[in-house]
Each structure stands twice: as structure tokens, then as C-alpha cells.
Image: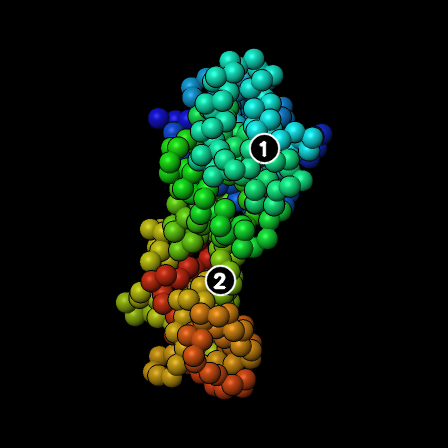
Amino acid sequence: MTSVLIKDVSLHYGAVHVLKSLNLDIAEGEFLVLLGPSGCGKSTLLNCIAGLLEVSSGQIFINGRNVTWEEPKDRGIGMVFQSYALYPQMSVEKNLSFGLRIAKVPADEIRRRVDRAAEILQIGPLLKRKPAELSGGQRQRVAMGRALVRDVDVFLFDEPLSNLDAKLRSELRVELKRLHQRLGNTMIYVTHDQIEALTLADRIAVMRSGVIQQLDAPQTIYNRPKNLYVAGFLGSPAMNFIKGAIEPMAGGFAFQTEAARIDLAGYVGEGGGLRAGPAILGVRPEHIAVGNGAGMLEAEVELIETMGSDSLVWLRHAGQPISARVESSRRHPVGEKLGVKLDLSLASLFDVETQERL
């Protein structure tokens, strides 16, 4: 069943179009992540779903009900913001129950919901404390608890972990995933952090300039990006892009760089077939083998980045930079000549003009 349906939603301020005829169908119980850089429209879309912004055109449905013009409180959503937005003079317990008390929910029901949220988020011992006595992670749990007590079907998260340090972000990512598995509610999550998107999402919507560039499962987007923008945005370190041209050869096609010719026999395309012409070959660092042997591209070591469990070797082939992941135990001095082999089954070819994957 569809939980949230976005139909042809646009939002503009004068001549500035923030969202452009967006269509999105979010299934019941799905964890959908809106991913993109600042200014791409992801938080704007979330605020439109919440009712905090009025759309210029289009419709929004939640659980089959048209809520396009309804007030936020009537949409059946719970929202967690980037800032904790807690009342400093109130205890954790009163912060959790404040909205319910304003809505005149019976006292015993308020107690049941607060206790349930405290148990799920493991903040029971904190209920009598005030926000100033809590750590950043504890405050964010309270902010999530305030959404949980509303007992709704759809939860909206607007970059809730961005104010936390790296270790705490990692811990709360795991807790959020567990929370979703336990509750089974629909969750829509906004972030610019690709690690959060890849680890949390059932599906990711990669956005750019108010348009969804690709909507798919995390591994599909990572391994088969729809276009050059998605390929470059997802991945840390970023995908390697090698300029060249596709040329016909006996039995198929080859990719020609300034210094090498690569047989494309192992390449998995989009079904439209390859065609001759200028192209960009994209390969992720972990899909590149470094060594010496026949059929390898010649490259020279420029820099080594030690990353703990592995290292990133920066090389240069025919004037073009290439990065490859290697075991941290391997040592390659700067200036060393190495061979580079690309895993074409996990590579992507992009048309230079359209920037679409071939």
C-alpha cells in the first residue's frame, strides 16, 4: 500500500523554482531517504509533506487522504528537526508530553505513550532531567521521542544527526535502523550525508535543483548510477572518471584513452547498447586492482592516503588521476610505475553530452 504520494508537486518563489513537478510514491513501512547537496530542495519537499510550506501546484496524499491544504497537526505525521527544539525549562518527561497535553489527550494515555517512547529510545532514567543536563545524543533521542509519542504512521526526519560528532552519528544511525525495524512505520529522512543514506534507506531519492535524479535501492544507485551527477555525488572516495571515446572493434566495442585501449566485453550497460563517440568511463576505487601484469593500464603513484583498514593509492594515467583502494599492508612509493586493472562488470560509461549512463 502507498503511505505517502506526491503528485506533480512544484514550489516556486517568483521566478525561482525550488521543486519542479515532483512525483514520488512511498510505500507503507518504507524508509526513504532524500539525498542531495544544500539547496537541492530535499528539506523543502519534507516541509511541504509536513504542511510547513504551501505548494505552488500539485497534491500530497498521506494514507490515501489528500492533505495538500490541511494544517500540519491534522496530517498524521511526526517530525524531528535538525535542531533539538526542546523546551529548556521543562523536564524530559514534560517535553515528551507537552504536545499531548495541549491536545487534551487523557492523562493515562499520555503516561502510556511517554513510557513506551522512553523504553524504545532507552531514555527512561532521563525523564526527570532538563535538556541542559543531557548530552547531544540524549537530546536528539528526546526530540525523536517527542515525535514517537504522537503515535502516527509517518515520521519525517530533517537531518537529525548533523549536529552530532562522527562517533555519535554512527551510533544513532544504528539505533534509527533498529527503531524502524521495531516500529515498521513509514519514515522519510533528509540528509546530505551519503553514508547515512546508504546505511539507512530502503530506497534513496537523489535530488538536484528540485528534481529527483534517481530513485532506487542503495546498492543499485551505488553500482549503476543513472547519470554522471549521481555517480559523482555518491561514494567516498568519489568514483574515478576517465575521459576517452568508445570505438568499434571486432566483436564489440573498446574504450580508447590517450594511452590505452580497453576491451568493453565485460561491461554491463543499460540495454540500449553502446555507440561510438566521446564518453566518460567511471570506476569506483574498490573496483580497481593494482599490480603488474598483461592487459593493465600503466600508471604512476602520486600519493598514498592511509585510511586504517585500507589505503587509497592516487595514480596518474595519461595525465588523468585514478584512485584505487588497496590493503593497508601494501607499500607503494611515490613515483612507482604500476599496472591498473578495471572491473568493467561494475563500471559505468556516460555519454559526454547527455551525461546519462550508457
Q: Is residue 222 visible?
A: yes
Q: Nearer the viewer, residue 13 or 307?
A: 307
In this picture, residue 285 sits left or right of residue 43: left
**The quarter of the displayed image where residue 208 is located:** top right
- The residue carrying mark 1 is 128
- The residue carrying mark 2 is 239
Q: Position of residue 318 (x, y in %)?
A: 52, 78
For label 2, count other residues whose C-alpha is less than 10 Å away and answer few (under 14), some (14-19) or many (20+): many
Q: Earlier in the sequence, mark 1 or mark 2?
A: 1
Helix, strand or loop at mark 1:
loop
Residue at the spot x=44%, y=47% of the render?
174
Query: Hey, what amino acid is under mark 1?
Result: Lys
The quadrant of the picture occupied by the C terminus is bottom left
In this rendering, the answer to whether 339 lies above or below 235 is below
Helix, strand or loop at mark 2:
loop
Q: Nearer the viewer, residue 289 or 354?
A: 289
Q: Position of residue 282 (x, y in %)?
A: 46, 62
Q: Nearer the viewer, residue 328 or 252?
A: 328
In this rendering, the answer to whether 313 lies above or below 60 is below
C-alpha separation, residue under disc 1 versus residue under disc 2 = 49 Å
Q: Position of residue 317 (x, y in %)?
A: 50, 77
Query: Hey, what amino acid is under mark 2?
Result: Met
Residue at the spot x=51%, y=20% of the render?
110
Residue at the spot x=64%, y=37% of the render?
131
Q: Is residue 226 visible?
A: no
In this rendering, the answer to whether 294 lies above or below 55 is below
